[in-house]
């Protein structure tokens, strides 16, 4: 009796498919090798097996669907969240000689008709659109009028309210599976915990998808986390070590972007600002100046970076704490995409977490709870004393075995430490106990500092044995130490008010 083919065949690429992919990589893109997991991810597309692909920023996700689109008959439909992202990919594809188009609201009637005609004629290999456009009744019926080779969902974490960039319009994408039965769907993202990964598969209605998760470690990045003391000076110190090289400075607010960019320019640094408050033209102009290296430093809010492909960024400085480890990984990950050494510096203050908590949209309780958990995880990372590479990789559910990464402040011993940390920690924990674990970090720090604030006396806490126990230190420093103890798990923040 003939044996059925071994089950491993399902995960092995067909030799023909492999040859065609390799050929197109070389001829169209000029690449002679795959990046990690690209071959496996492309294999899923070629075989029509639904997939969830998680690769870090710079890992080469777009090629995972672009190359198979070129190697298959029909048109691949790509859902992407931003017009600028689509435009960049379409432009890059056209430059390589691949027929691609994006449908969006800025097109004229004639342009749209032209794209529709060329798609029906089988001339377009990749058709991009934002989810809300794909799901409009007109587009849905259009999708049934041509041969859709597969559906790719870019930035797929946007579908999950557990993720850090939830976009409700992504939820509707599951409809595509109904409108196009039998067409495989593939989801791509740079940031997904196991929970988000499962959520992506479930929300999209993927059928027994293959999960491909790349390594999150970026060994060429050197991480350093510092308390913000004299921010501009700290930023200047990093920039000074990278004269003439490209770098990004992320700030939490637009105001801080403006102020920092102006200050750097005043110091003779070639810097430009980028945030959502600038006009489209200004933003484009500043982004181009950075990419074309007419300025060295771009000072930006998180609005900057998605879809920007500049491989020689030598440092990324966070002038404030980002709102999640996912954000941190993505933003710091823009450094060193060429694989050469690059530096990531995070300056944080205890107040950053409260700033993010205040800015959290509370309208969707599930999303708000996830956002608050993300802020806490980020604060714990910043205040933590675990190897940064290890902490990041473990956050994304992978293990990190090296005892010393050789490329972070913790492993280098560059972490600022205090004298007698044990006694300091005991004093703080003792004060938390005397306050009967009913107060938050700010209040506890003030009691330890011996603050004369009225509410402390009103509560009788000026009579506690721990009142003023750390009066030689500023309350802000004590607040930081409390944050660090929480980061290391010695203290837990509980409830709505983050009671210790
Ligand atoms: P991601 O979307 O995962 O952040 P991109 O798709 O933008 O990453 O790719 C990052 C960079 O790597 C791009 O410049 C891309 O052209 C390049 N790249 C992708 N795959 C390869 C490869 N196999 N060989 C060489 N360069 C590649
Ligand atoms: Zn380390």
Image (spheres, rainbow, N blue to C red):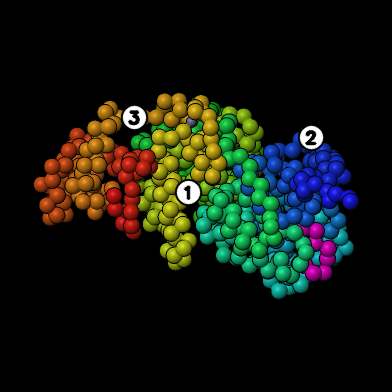
Kind of element beneath mark 1: loop
Which residue is nearer to you in this view: 279 or 162? 162
Reading the image, the residue beneath label 1 is: 324
Check whether the beta carbons of the residues at disc 1 and disc 2 lie within 8 A of each other. Answer: no
Residue at (29% x, 49% y) in the render: 500
Residue at (32% x, 42% y) in the render: 490
What segment is highlighted magenta in the picture? 143-150
Residue at (31% x, 56% y) in the render: 497
Where 435 falls versus 488 (above or below)?
Answer: below
Can residue 404 be seen here? The reply is yes
Reading the image, the residue beneath label 3 is: 417
Real-space Cα distance between discs 1 and 2? 36 Å
Reading the image, the residue beneath label 2 is: 32
- Whether ligand 1 has any atom under 8 Å from the Cβ at mark 2 is answered as yes
Real-space Cα distance between discs 2 and 3? 47 Å
Residue 188: percent from the left, percent from the top?
Answer: 66, 52
Q: Is 75 on the left or on the right of 226, as rendered? A: right
Kind of element beneath mark 3: loop
Instruction: Give the mark, 2 or 3, whose residue is nearer the N terminus.
Output: 2
Which residue is nearer to you in this view: 169 or 434? 434
């Amino acid at each position: 009796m003939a044996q059925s083919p071994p089950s491993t065949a399902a995960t092995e690429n067909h030799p023909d498919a492999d040859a065609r992919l390799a050929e197109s990589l070389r001829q169209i893109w000029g690449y002679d090798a795959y990046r990690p997991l690209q071959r496996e991810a492309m294999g899923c597309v070629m075989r029509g097996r639904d997939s969830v692909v998680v690769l870090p920023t710079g890992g080469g996700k777009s090629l995972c669907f672009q190359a198979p689109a070129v190697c298959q008959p029909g048109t691949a439909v790509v859902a992407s969240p931003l017009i600028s992202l689509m435009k960049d990919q379409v432009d890059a594809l056209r430059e390589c000689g691949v027929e691609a188009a994006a449908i969006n609201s800025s097109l004229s009637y004639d342009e749209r008709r032209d794209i529709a005609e060329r798609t029906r004629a089988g001339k377009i290999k990749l058709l991009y659109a934002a989810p809300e456009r794909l799901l409009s009744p007109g587009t849905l019926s259009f999708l049934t009028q041509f041969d859709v080779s597969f559906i790719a969902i870019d930035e797929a974490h946007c579908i999950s309210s557990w993720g850090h960039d939830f976009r409700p319009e992504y939820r509707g994408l599951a409809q595509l599976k109904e409108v196009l039965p039998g067409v495989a769907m593939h989801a791509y993202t740079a940031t997904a915990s196991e929970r988000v990964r499962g959520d992506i598969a479930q929300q999209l209605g993927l059928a027994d998808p293959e999960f491909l998760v790349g390594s999150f470690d970026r060994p060429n990045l050197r991480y350093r986390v510092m308390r913000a003391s004299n921010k501009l000076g700290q930023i200047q110190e990093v920039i000074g070590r990278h004269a003439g090289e490209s770098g990004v400075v992320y700030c939490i607010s637009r105001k801080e972007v403006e102020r920092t960019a102006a200050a750097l320019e005043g110091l003779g640094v070639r810097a430009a600002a980028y945030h959502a408050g600038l006009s489209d033209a200004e933003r484009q102009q500043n982004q181009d100046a950075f990419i074309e290296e007419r300025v060295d430093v771009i000072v930006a809010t998180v609005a900057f970076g998605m879809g920007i492909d500049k491989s020689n960024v030598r440092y990324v400085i966070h002038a404030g704490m980002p709102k999640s480890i996912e954000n941190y990984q993505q933003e710091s990950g823009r450094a060193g995409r060429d694989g050469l050494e690059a530096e990531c510096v995070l300056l944080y203050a205890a107040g950053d977490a409260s700033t993010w908590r205040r800015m959290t949209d509370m309208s969707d309780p599930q999303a708000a709870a996830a956002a608050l958990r993300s802020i806490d995880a980020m604060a714990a990372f910043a205040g933590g004393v675990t190897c940064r590479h290890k902490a990041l990789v473990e956050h994304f559910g992978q293990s990190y075995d090296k005892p010393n990464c050789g490329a972070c402040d913790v492993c280098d011993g560059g972490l600022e430490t205090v004298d007698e940390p044990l006694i300091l920690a005991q004093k703080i924990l003792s004060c938390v106990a005397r306050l009967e674990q009913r107060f938050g970090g700010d209040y506890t720090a003030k009691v330890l500092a011996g603050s004369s604030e009225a509410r402390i006396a009103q509560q009788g806490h000026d009579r506690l044995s721990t009142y003023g126990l750390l009066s030689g230190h500023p309350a802000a420093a004590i607040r930081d130490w409390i944050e660090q103890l929480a980061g290391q798990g010695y203290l837990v923040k509980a409830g709505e008010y983050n009671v210790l």
